[in-house]
Every structure is written in structure tokens, then in C-alpha cells.
Image (cartoon, rainbow, N blue to C red):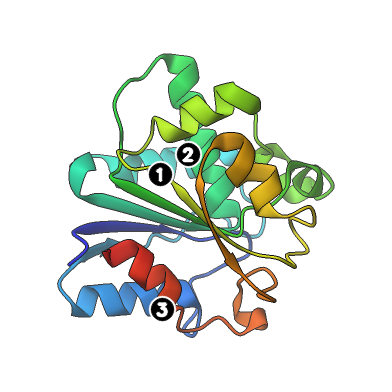
Amino acid sequence: MAGDVLILHGWQNRRPEGHWQRWLADELEARGSRVRYPQLPEPDAPVLDDWLEALDSELAGIEPAGLTVVAHSLGCMLWMAHAARRAEAGAAGAVARRVVLAAPAAPDVLRDIPEIAAFAPALEGDTARRALTATAIERPVIVASDVDPYCPEGADRRYAIPLGLDFVQVRGGGHLSMDDGYGPFPLVYDLVTR
């Protein structure tokens, strides 16, 4: 059993049936995990502060040692913004045991889309690495495709290597979305339950 699991969706996502995050929530709940899979506010025109407030509400009262966070796409950027805000506030201590970030978008791609430009990472380099790794007891892991249009340079080169994160590549997986064929996604289930 994975304990508590918080699933964070991406841009324009209304947690549809058939999405791998919905499948993951159902699988985990069936095996006794406590799953939080909130609908974040205004998914078509998200406001970073509103999403951060919703994230804070979801994290309230959860024991970090028993929490796994699974984020996809803009949900990854939300988690990175949360990490940056905690670092800027001088917050100490992890808020999760494990963090799995699936298909994070590149900053330049985000900045080119007005509706989500505010989600581009505020921190870079060692500052970003320290902020992100401080959110979790275990080293966070990036799961990404080698052909993601939202991160054309590759999430390994953009995030995993410079931030010192674990990396799992999915060959030919696109943005790891329903359109790319990701309903059931056993790889992420295994990362959550290991």
C-alpha cells in the first residue's frame, strides 16, 4: 500500500475517465491507499496563486513520511512553484516522502503560452535543486518521454540532470497524455508503490 497519495493534474485537465491519473487513483484506492485527486481551479485558465492555495489545502494535515505526490504536466510546474515559494519563505522539512513528476514542460514553452506563462519555474540551477529536493524525503523522480512537444530538449537535460533528480524515460510517449495512449500506466503505479 502506498499510504497517502496526492495526484496533481495539468492544464485543461478535468480528471477525465480514461486518463492515467484517474486509473492510478482507482488502482491505489482499490488497494487501500488514501488518494486525494483534487480538481484544481479553472484548469483552462489557471492562476498560479489559486493553484498554490489549493495545493496548500490538500497538504494540510498529511504526514509527510506517508505521502507520495504524483504530478503531470502543469501539475509538475505547480509542485516546482510550491518548492520555490517554500525556499523563499525559509521553510524547512520535507512535505512528502516521494515525488513523481511526469512530463514537466520546459520554461520557454510555458512562457510562449499566455494562459500558463506564470507557471514557468522561478528558480534555476542549485537554488532550484535545493528547493525541489527539500520537499521530499526521497530524491524526486522525473518520468518523461524522449519526444515530448512540451519539453523538446528532453526532461532529462532540462530537469533531471541539472537538478540531480532520478529519471525514467518513456520512449515515444509524447506528453504522456490520453491522446498519447496513456490510460493505464503501470510504470507510475510501480514508482508510487515501491
Does residue 123 show up?
A: no
Q: Position of residue 126 (x, y in %)?
A: 58, 23
Quadrant occupied by the N terminus: bottom left
The residue tagged 3 is 186
The residue tagged 2 is 52
Foreground: disc 3 or disc 1? 3
5 vs 20: above or below:
above
Residue type of the residue flagged with mark 1: Leu
Quadrant occupied by the C terminus: bottom left
User: Marks 2/3: CA distance?
Assistant: 28 Å
**Which residue corresponds to the image point at 54% horizontal and 50% vertical from the top-left?**
76
User: Marks 2/1: CA distance?
Assistant: 5 Å
**Which residue corresponds to the image point at 47% horizontal and 77% vertical from the top-left?**
20
- Secondary structure state at the residue bearing disc 1: helix
Does residue 108 show up?
A: yes
Dot 3, how many residues are within 10 Å of its Cα: few (below 14), some (14-19), or many (20+)? Answer: some
Residue 55: which numbered mark, if any?
A: 1
